[in-house]
Image: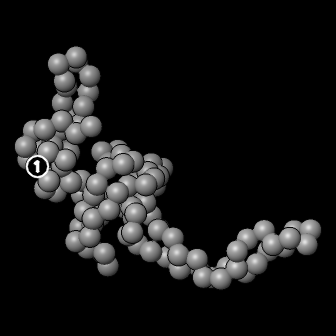
Amino acid sequence: MKIKRGDTVLVISGNDRGETGTVQRVIAGSSRVVVSGINIIKKHQKPVQTGGRSKTQPGIIEYEGPVHVSNVQLICPGCGQPTRVGYGHDEGGLKVRVCKRCEAVIK
């Protein structure tokens, strides 16, 4: 996948279009990413008791839901613009991610 954990991304479609956030988790099997502050989901949770003690916190819990990787675009740390990601080789011969706009290496 061209998007990795810790990358800053821009949401390009959906209800949160135009917002940016940092990738917290990558779910490679379903091509999805979890972005901080994007796609907030509210879950109503009941308390679950095990042996007289409450195991889970009851109430309404908010958390970030996964977003498909096609709905986000990487923001290049070099030029600061949303960009596509390509691959190239550095001087040591290792495969690295490259910004398609400014040809900068993305760490």
Task: Please provide percent x and percent y for residue 89.
Answer: 19, 25
Asked if residue 101 is positioned above or below residue 87 in the image, the reply reads below
Applied colour scheme: one colour
| One can see residue 34 in this view | yes
Image quadrant holding the N terminus, namely: top left
Task: Please provide percent x and percent y for residue 15.
Answer: 32, 79
Q: Residue at x 38, y 69 (%)?
A: 38
Q: Residue at x 7, y 43 (%)?
A: 102
84 left or right of 50 in image: left
Q: Residue furthest top?
A: 92
Task: Please count the marks in the image.
Answer: 1
Say which of 28 and 23 sits in front: 23
Q: Residue at x 76, y 78 (%)?
A: 47
Q: Residue furthest left?
A: 102
| One can see residue 70 in this view | no
Q: Residues within 10 Å of mark 1 (few under 14, many from 20)?
A: few
Asked if residue 25 is positioned above or below residue 45 in the image, the reply reads above
Say which of 61 and 94 sits in front: 61
Image quadrant holding the C terminus, namely: top left
Q: Residue at x 47, y 68 (%)?
A: 65
Task: Please provide percent x and percent y for residue 22.
Answer: 34, 57
Residue labelled with disc 1: 79
Q: Secondary structure at mark 1?
A: loop
Task: Please provide percent x and percent y for residue 80.
Answer: 14, 53
Q: Quadrant of residue 54?
A: bottom right
Asked if residue 96 is positioned above or below residue 64 in the image, the reply reads above
Residue type at numbered disc 1: Cys
Q: Residue furthest front?
A: 53
